[in-house]
Image (cartoon, rainbow, N blue to C red):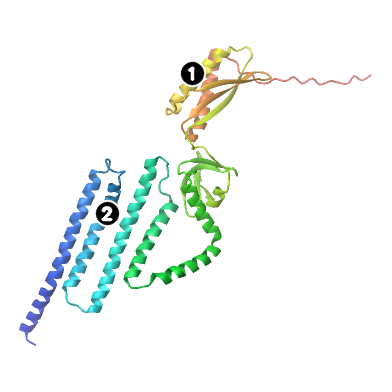
Amino acid sequence: MSIFSYDIDFTTTLDLLLIPVCIVLAALAAGVIADRLVRRYINRHLSVEESTWKYVFVRSMHGVPIFFSFIIGLYWAIDAVEISPTLTKLFSYLLFTSNVLIITRVIARTVDGIVTMYFERSGKNLPKTTLLNGILIGVIYAMGILVILQYYGVSIAPILTAAGVGGMAVALALQETLANIFAGLHLILSKQLRLGDYIKLSSGEEGRVTDITWRFTTIIPVGASNTIVIPNKTIAGANITNYSLPSKQINISVPIGVSYDSDLSLVERVTVETAKEVLSRVDKSVIANPLVRFTDFGESSIDFVVVLQSSLFDHQGLIKHEFIKALTERYRKEGIDMPYPIRTIIQEQEIKE
């Protein structure tokens, strides 16, 4: 074969590849432009429309236009080239699979963001947990896989039947795990336990809820750096005191006693003033005024209770600490005595004759 024929074949090959390459490059350029527009929209509306479904959808599209446009361009390029039907069908399957997975990913991220936005707007303090997030993403991706299998010509009915039979076997083998999963869902959907709530179980464990996973709920006690991990079914079956429901504010009772010689009006005024001063320093979010309620005539003192409010359960320890210090100092300045019980023990001695 002559050099001239080689030149003709090379030129023909270039002519055949020119159109597909141009299609791919044009689609890729369009994808880059679309992705830049998406990023520009996200940066401009970050603080204004962050809690809208439109912003959530656009944010879930970040990075997708480039890959999606490349796949579409590649599909058109293959269609423009005359290749064997087998290869064409194979490429169409691969491209369809890629597109479905991209769309599934966008839908999963959008639904996840919208659900999170809904709970934040409703004030129920239930952002996405590991459990809720995993279930949503798992269901959406499972639907995407079923769509792909349907496109391949695979019958879904036998798969669903086998999944049902296999699910029964798995349910019997993983009873404890499934019990924890459904208990976790119950805790989330019942809205009686939310992320950030401070709880105390009847078994004695207490702390702030940090996450609800497939099997466990994690809590961190006040002032501790360690995490307590509790199975979901244990929490679902326990008596729980939620210090964050119906309101995060809690009342703190501090018992005090003063001598019988004290002016009770002065005691009440000084105590309330001191409590207000401490709350203004330690917890400025408190609105309710402190209260003084005399309760009992004790053995050596007139007893009463000071009721202070705390905006969070975590603040009560510091509020008590500062209040007791400040009140002791103020009572000493005002001459108010806080007596302590004194008992004299008389021991009789036997007289020996």
Which residue occupies the extreme bottom position in the image?
1
For residue 179, side relative to residue 155 (left or right): right
Q: Residues within 10 Å of mark 1 (few under 14, many from 20)?
A: some
> Which circle, 1 or 2, is nearer the viewer?
2
Give how far apart the Cα atoms at labels 1 and 2 are: 57 Å
**Residue located 49% across and 18% down the image:** 273
Amino acid under label 1? Glu
Residue 350 placement: quadrant: top right
| Percent coordinates x, y for residue 89 in the rendering | 26, 75
**Residue 254: where, in percent of width, then height?**
56, 26
State the mark number for residue 61: 2
Image quarter hosting the C terminus: top right
Judge whether 124 appears above or below 171 on screen: above
Placement of 319 over or under 267, stated as above or below: below
Query: Which residue is denoted by mark 1 in the rendering?
Result: 273
In primary-sequence order, the first of circles 1 and 2 is: 2
* Residue 25 place in picture, x, y as percent: 16, 64
Depth check: 158 or 172 in front?
158
Residue, far right: 353
- The reply to whether residue 335 is visible in this rendering is no
Is label 1 in contact with label 2 (beta carbons under 8 Å)?
Answer: no
| Viewer-closest of 233 and 28 | 233
Within 10 Å of the Cα at label 2, are there few (<14), some (14-19), or many (20+) other Cα atoms? Answer: many
Quadrant hosting residue 304: top right
Q: Where residue 54 sits in the image (x, y, percent)?
A: 27, 48
The secondary element bearing badge 2 is classed as loop
- Image quarter of the N terminus: bottom left
